[in-house]
Image (spheres, rainbow, N blue to C red):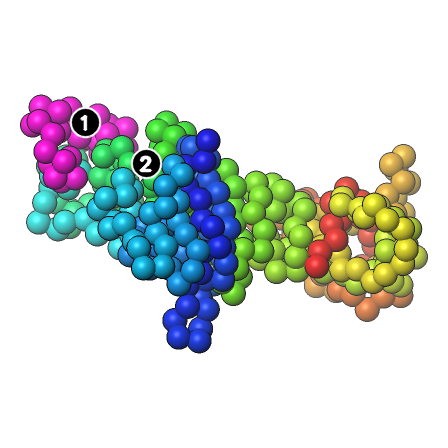
């Protein structure tokens, strides 16, 4: 059952189109992230879902009912949604308990029911022992937990999050990614999450909609976005990749100058010859001191190590294949050490090569 649907959703500001004919449907209890660089239209999309911005064209539907269209926007307070802003927007003059109870009191619940639900949600977000503190006495991560508790305690039909972790340091961001996912798994609230951080989107989402210049380029599960990107932009934005020009010849790929033939992860059904662009992830390329002779028949070519950087968990190598002008980014384990200028053999995992547009 669909909970939230965007149908041709568009927003223009004069001659500038910020959101361009977006179509997206979320099922009940699904967590979907809008991921993209600054200015791609993701926050404007979220604000149209919330009812703060009127669309120029298209519609927002919830449970089959149109709640936003040109000239007709249901007010935010009547949508049954909760929104968490980048700044958290918790009341500085209220304690943790009072902040979380605020929405329940507006709904005129009994004092006993308010106490019960506030106490329950504060324990869930591990803030029960700080119920009497004020926001100024809390860390950034604790303030974020208060914002989450306040949003969830009213049991919204849809939860909206706008860059909620951008004000936290790196360690707290990583911790809160998993906390947001844990809370989603517990309450199963349909969620739209806006971020420019791919790691946040990958850690929290059931599906990710990658946006670029106001349009959705691809919507998929995180692992499919990474392993089977459909466009150059998605391949480059989700993780790191090598983009290589090649030829498609009767269902096989020929990498120019490599003398290789490999089958892609997403082969085309029809034959013929045409130029194609490949996305090859750094970890799908292997480095060897001797020519590999594995039974899987992975194609290999000689090359030279041009650069290297040690990143702790991995080595990040730049390798130049013999007879080809390409410079390949290759990721290797920390104990696989190659010197700059060293001759190596490079092989490719055909299962991790994707054609992109």
Q: Nearer the viewer, mark 2 or mark 1?
A: 2
Q: Is residue 260 left or right of residue 276?
A: right
Q: Kindly state the secondary structure of the residue where label 1 is placed.
A: helix
321 or 135: nearer the viewer = 135
Tag shown at residue 243: none
Q: Where does label 2 land, which residue? A: 157
Residue furthest to the front in view is 71
Q: Are marks 2 and 1 in contact (CB under 8 Å)?
A: no
| 111 falls in the magenta region | yes
Query: Marks 2 and 1, how far apart in space?
Result: 17 Å
- The residue sitting at 34% across, 39% down in the picture is 158
10 Å neighbourhood of mark 1: few (<14), some, or many (≥20)?
some
Q: In terms of depth relative to the viewer, which is nearer, 43 or 23?
A: 23
Residue 319 seen in the figure:
no
- On screen, residue 291 above or below 41: above
Q: Which residue is mark 1?
A: 117
Residue 74 coordinates in the image, percent (x, y): 27, 50
Local secondary structure at mark 2: loop
> Range of the magenta residues?
102-128
Q: Residue at point 85% right, 66% down?
A: 324
In what quadrant of the picture does the C terminus appear? bottom right
Overall secondary structure of the magenta section:
helix
């Amino acid at each position: 059952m669909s909970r939230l649907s965007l149908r041709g959703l568009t927003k223009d500001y004069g001659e500038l189109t910020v959101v361009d004919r977006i179509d997206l449907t979320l099922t009940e209890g699904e967590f979907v992230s809008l991921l993209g660089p600054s200015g791609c239209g993701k926050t404007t999309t979220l604000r149209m879902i919330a009812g703060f911005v009127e669309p120029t064209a298209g519609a927002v539907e919830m449970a089959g009912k149109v709640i936003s269209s040109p000239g007709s926007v249901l007010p935010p307070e009547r949508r049954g949604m909760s929104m968490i802003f980048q700044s958290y927007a918790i009341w500085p003059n209220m304690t943790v308990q009072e902040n979380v109870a605020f929405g329940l009191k507006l709904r005129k619940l009994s004092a006993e029911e308010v106490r019960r639900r506030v106490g329950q949600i504060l324990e869930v977000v591990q803030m029960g022992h700080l119920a009497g503190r004020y926001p100024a006495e809390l860390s950034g991560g604790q303030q974020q937990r208060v914002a989450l508790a306040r949003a969830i305690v009213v049991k919204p039909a849809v939860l909206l999050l706008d860059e909620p972790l951008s004000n936290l340091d790196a360690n707290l961001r990583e911790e809160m990614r998993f906390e947001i996912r844990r809370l989603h798994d517990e309450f199963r609230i349909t969620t739209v999450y806006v971020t420019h951080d791919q790691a946040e989107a990958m850690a929290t989402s059931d599906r990710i909609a990658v946006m670029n210049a106001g349009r959705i380029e691809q919507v998929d599960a995180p692992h499919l976005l990474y392993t089977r990107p459909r466009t150059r932009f998605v391949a480059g934005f989700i993780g790191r990749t090598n983009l290589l020009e090649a030829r498609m010849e009767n269902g096989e790929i020929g990498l120019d100058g490599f003398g290789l033939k490999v089958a892609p992860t997403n082969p085309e059904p029809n034959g013929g010859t045409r130029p194609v662009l490949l996305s090859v992830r750094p970890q799908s390329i292997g480095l060897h001191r001797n020519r590999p002779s594995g039974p899987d028949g992975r194609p290999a070519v000689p090359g030279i190590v041009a650069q290297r950087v040690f990143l702790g968990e991995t080595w990040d190598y730049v390798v130049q294949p013999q007879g080809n002008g390409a410079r390949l980014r290759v990721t290797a384990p920390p104990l696989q050490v190659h010197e700059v200028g060293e001759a190596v053999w490079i092989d490719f995992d055909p299962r991790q090569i994707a054609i992109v547009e």
